[in-house]
Image (tube, grey):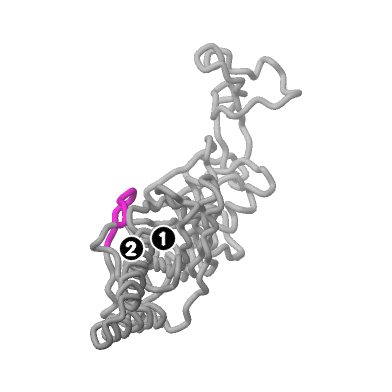
Amino acid sequence: MFNFSSSLPIKEIAEGEAIGWRHIIIRPTGLGLGMLAVSAAAWILALNYSVNLAYGLSFWILSFSIWAMLQAILQLYGTTLLRTQTAECFAGENATLTITVKGSNLRQRRLYLRFINPDDENLMPMQFLHTNDDKNNSVRLSFPTIRRGIVKVPVLQIYTHAPFSLLSVYTFLQTDWKVTVFPNPVERKFFLSNHEKGSDEDGKITQSGRDDVAFLSAYQIGEPLKQVAWKQYAKSNKLLSKQMEEEHSVSSNIISYKDYPDVSSHDELASYLCFRVLSAEKDRRSYILELPYDFISPQNGQRNKALTALSIF
C-alpha cells in the first residue's frame, strides 16, 4: 500500500498537539474514483440527450461523494494523541505504549494505528482503535528495542478509509515521545571490592553509628512502636519505620560497579548490575547501588531510580 523509504512524508507533532491539515495525506480509493467517473458519465449523458433525471443523478452522486470524502478527512482531523508507557522494558524486548485518542465524536471514528520503521520492510500489523464509547478510546502498540537508554518512539502511522472507503486518509507522525529502556539483566560472578566504608580486623566492610537513622520505610504491622518516626507522622500523617544503622557487614548490600574490575564495556557492566538490582528487589533485600557519579540508597521508588540510572550509565 505504501512505499516505505527515506522519502516518506513524515510530519513532526508535539505532545498534546491536534492533528491538522499539514499532517494529513489524502488519496482517492478505487471506489472513490469510480463514483466520480459515474457522476461524470451521468453528466455527459444528460448533456447529450437532455435527460433531466441524469442531471439529478449526477448531482446526487457528486454531492454524496464530496460529503463522504469530508467525513473521511474528519476521522483524523482534530484528534489529539496522548501516551503512557504501560510496563518496564528491558533491552531486546518490545516496548509497549498505550495511546489514547482525544477528540469529538469518537464513536464515529474508525482508525488503524501502528509503529513503523521507514527503513524496514517487515511492518507490524495495524491495530484497530475501538471507540464504541467516549471512554474506550485507547490502543496498545509495541515496537522492538535493541539497546538500553532513553529511546525515541518510532514513526506512528494512522490510517482510515471510513466511513464509505472513498478516500484513504493517513498520516505519518514523528512524535516527541520517549521511553526508558533498562539494561538486559545478565548474571555474572563478581568480586566484592572495598566500598570505602571502613573495615574491621577481618577485612569486612562495616558501618558505624548504631543509633543513627539510615532511612525511612513504610511501617509494617508487627514492628516495634519505638521504630515509628513520630515526627514524620505528625507532619505527613503517614506511618514510617526508622531503619537504624548498625555495625554489620554491608559488602553484600552494596551493588557497585567496582565489583567488576575486568569489565570495560558500560553496556555489559549495566547488565550485570541490573541483574543484581532485580535479584535484590525480588528477594526484598535492602541494597545500595553505587555508580561512578551516583549513589542510590534505600528510598521510595528505589527500583525505578536504580534501573533508570543504569539505563543511562
The secondary structure type at the circle numbered 2 is helix
Question: Residue 206, image x and y in percent?
Answer: 57, 38
Q: Residue at x 72, y 19 (%)?
A: 224
What's the distance in space between the residues labelled 2 and 1, CA to CA? 43 Å
Question: Residue 256, image x and y in percent?
Answer: 50, 52
Magenta segment includes 18: yes
- Name the amino acid type tagged 2: Leu
Q: Which residue is mark 1?
A: 149
Q: Which residue is mark 2?
A: 70
Question: Residue 34, image x and y in percent?
Answer: 38, 83
Which of the two marks, 2 or 1, is nearer to us in this view? Answer: 2
In the image, the segment drawn in magenta is 12-19
Quadrant where the N terminus sits is bottom left
- Name the amino acid type tagged 1: Gly
Farthest residue to the bottom: give it: 48
**Majority secondary structure in the magenta region:** loop
